[in-house]
Image: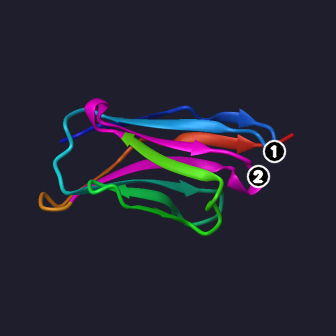
Amino acid sequence: QVQLVESGGGLVQPGGSLRLSCVASRNIISPYVMGWYRQAPGKQRESVATISSGGRTNYADSVKGRYTISRDNAKNTVYLQMNSLKPEDTAVYYCNLKETFQRTDYWGQGTQVTVSS
């Protein structure tokens, strides 16, 4: 088992920035994919950004050029740097971990991001 704990959400004005963090409670077993998803009220959860154990990243078209996913393997942590935030980025952001060979699929509890003036 692994617990994923997100932090860094909050209220920010349009054009502002936030950095989300997700810490895993144990060493992550490669190969894996970690990612950030978000769910706005009344909408389905969607993938925002993912990073593999090999370092490959993927981004939703809506966040390309504004968001950056990164990781610190020594700290079992993945980050999401969010710049130029827009009101439509408002959502609960969830961290996810999938360990390929173990076939695990873990979710964090979510952190609220609100972009409003």
- For the residue marked with disc 2, what is the amino acid? Lys
**Is label 2 in contact with label 1 (beta carbons under 8 Å)?**
yes
Q: Position of residue 54 (x, y in %)?
A: 27, 57
Name the residue tied to disc 2.
86
Q: How is the image coloured?
A: rainbow
Name the residue nearer the viewer: 86 or 105: 86
Residue named by callout 1: 14
Asked if the stretch drawn in magenta spans residue 25, the answer is: no
Q: Earlier in the sequence, mark 2 or mark 1?
A: 1
Q: Is residue 55 above or below residue 28?
A: below
Q: Is residue 77 magenta?
A: yes
Residue drawn at point x = 18 percent, y = 42 percent: 1
> Which quadrant of the figure contains the C terminus?
top right
The region drawn magenta spans: 72-99
Cα separation, mark 2 vs mark 1, equals 5 Å
Q: Quadrant of residue 35?
A: bottom left
Q: Position of residue 21 (x, y in %)?
A: 46, 35
Q: Residue furthest left?
A: 101
